[in-house]
Image (cartoon, grey):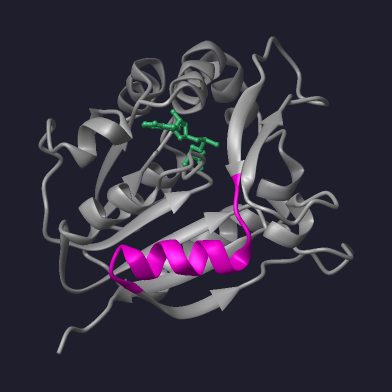
Amino acid sequence: MPASESSLLQSWHHNAAAWIEAIRSASIESRQQVTDQAILLAVLSRQPERVLDLGCGEGWLLRALADRGINVVGVDGDASLVEAARAAGSSAVHVASYEALVETQVDIGSGYDLICANFALLHQDIIPLLAAMNALLAPGGALVIQTLHPWTAAAGDYQDGWREETFAGFKGQWQPMPWYFRTLSSWLNALDMAGFQLVSLQEPQHPQSPVPQSLLLMTAPRCSG
Ligand SMILES: C[S@@+](CC[C@H](N)C(=O)[O-])C[C@H]1O[C@@H](n2cnc3c(N)ncnc32)[C@H](O)[C@@H]1O
C-alpha cells in the first residue's frame, strides 16, 4: 500500500473513538441536515433487497437500512469501527482493508443489488477497488457513491492530489487524515475505467446554503457489446 494510503487507514485506527462519538452525537451538521438523508433516499430509490455498505464505519447506514427491512452487509478496514457496528446490532460486518478486498483475501459475499460508499472512497487508486465491487453486484445492480463535492472541497485548487483533513472544529483527539481530492471528470473517468456508467448525479444542498454539501453519483455496470 502506498505511504499516503496506509497513513489514511492508520488515521482511522487512531480516530475511531472520536468518529463514533461524532456520528452518534449527531454533531456533523451537514450530515444531519442533508447528506444522511441523501444517501438513504438514493439507496432506497433502487428498492434493493441486499446491500453492501463499503467503508461502513460505525454502521449508522447499516442500521438505517436494516430498519427498513433490507438485508445489509458492511465492510470496513478499522476493527474498532466494525466492533462498534456489531455492538450496535449489525451482525454481518467484516473487517477488511480495501487492498484486501481488491486481492479477494476476505469473502464479503456477492450478488448485491446495490453497493454504497458514503464518504468512504478517500484514497488515490480507487479503480481496482471499484472493479472488484463491480464483480460483487447482481445483474441489474448499482453502485452509489456520496463524496465531498469537488467544487466545494477544491478550496481554490481544482486539481487531483493528496490533501489533509485536520478535523478542525470537531471535538476530541484527532489525527490528521490524508485524503485524495479528485475533480468531477476524474471521478467519472475512474468509474468508467472500472466498468461503470453514470446513471444520475445529484448535488445535495441545504436550502440556506450557497454551496452543495456533497456529490452523489448513481452508477451501474456498463453494458458490454
Ligand atoms: C468518513 S468515514 C465514513 C464511514 C461511513 N461510511 C459513514 O458514512 O459514516 C470513512 C471510512 O472509510 C474507511 N476506510 C478508509 N480507508 C480505508 C481502507 N483503505 N480500507 C478499508 N476501509 C477504509 C474508514 O475506516 C472509515 O470508516
Which percent across, then down, holds residue 39?
Answer: 51, 60
Name which residue lies at 43% across and 21% down: 6
Residue 83 figure quarter = top left
Q: Where, by quadrant of the figure, is residue 178 drawn? A: top right
Q: Residue at x 39, y 15 (%)?
A: 80
Q: Left of 204 or right of it: where is 70? A: left
Relative to 200, say whether 147 is above or below: above
In this rendering, would 33 be left or right of 15? right
Is residue 78 visible from the viewing direction of this image?
A: yes
Q: Which image quarter has ligand 1?
A: top left
Find the residue positioned furthest to the bottom.
225
- Residue 19: percent from the left, percent from the top? 58, 24
The mark tally for this picture is 0
Vertical placement of residue 199 versus 25, above or below: below
Where residue 10 appears, as percent x and y from the top left, is 47, 16
**205, 168: nearer the viewer:** 168
Horizontal side, residue 80 vs residue 151: left or right: left
Q: Which residues are magenta?
A: 181-196
Q: Residue at x 89, y 65 (%)?
A: 210
The N terminus is located in which quarter?
top left
Measured as percent of width and height from the top left, residue 26 is found at 66, 35
Residue 3 falls inside the magenta stretch: no
